[in-house]
Image (tube, rainbow, N blue to C red):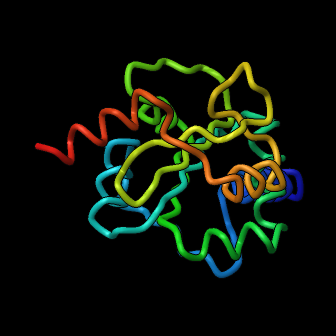
Amino acid sequence: SAMGAFRLFALLAAAAVASLQVPGIQLVTDVADLPALQGRCKTDKKPGLAIVTAPWCGACKGLLRSVAANTKLQQLLSTRVVVHGEGDAEKGWQGAGKNDSYLPRVYLVDDKGTVLRGKPSNPQYEFFYNSADDLVAAIQAKPTAGKKAARRAARDQEL
């Protein structure tokens, strides 16, 4: 029926909007959580970025559209390991000792596998970014690992 076809089209359109598609960027699909991304960045000696979303999240859809349309961010991402954690998988994307319930979350990881602290869109939420422009600013500002993580990384290198 025409109504059935319309429903199917609407479902497919919603699914397409909820998935990260960035021109010129090949998403890594074999990384399932933050520790795996950290390991991959360390192994590949490349920085990484994970965008964590859920299909029901309006702010997530807005971020994904913003990322897909931002050529400056696309240039920055072309040299990174890029992952999209979506759907129920978002529960596996947590910082160490964290149980963040907000979305979207974006994790910036350096080439040593350290989760970096950028300047989020809302400072109350450590990994919350709601636009590609905010992500560009965070990446260009050279985010840091924070004092504790920097001490831990230095100690790990001594071992």
Q: In the image, is 10 to the left or to the right of 89?
A: right
In the rendered image, the vertical position of residue 29 relative to residue 149, given as above or below: below
Q: In the image, is 94 to the left or to the right of 56?
A: left
Point out residue 43 in the picture as x, y percentages from the top left corner. Answer: 27, 65
In the rendered image, the vertical position of residue 152 relative to residue 106, given as above or below: above
Residue lying at the far bottom in this picture: please name it: 24
In the rendered image, the vertical position of residue 82 relative to residue 90, given as above or below: below
Identify which residue is drawn at 80% across, 48% down.
134
* Total numbered circles: 0
Identify which residue is drawn at 73% across, 19% down.
124
Q: Tell which of 96 and 155 is nearer to you.
A: 155
Q: Tell which of 100 and 121 is nearer to you.
A: 121
Residue lying at the far left in this picture: please name it: 159
Quadrant of the rendering where the C terminus is positioned: top left
Q: In the image, is 63 to the left or to the right of 77?
A: right
Point out residue 47 in the picture as x, y percentages from the top left corner. Answer: 47, 62
Quarter of the image for residue 71 reads: bottom right
Point out residue 118 in the picture as x, y percentages from the top left corner. Answer: 64, 41
Can residue 8 be seen here? The reply is no
In the rendered image, the vertical position of residue 149 relative to residue 124, given as above or below: below
Identify which residue is drawn at 41% across, 33% down.
92
Can residue 62 be seen here? The reply is yes
Quadrant of the rendering where the N terminus is positioned: bottom right
Identify which residue is drawn at 54% across, 55% down.
49
Point out residue 81 in the picture as x, y percentages from the top left corner. Answer: 47, 65
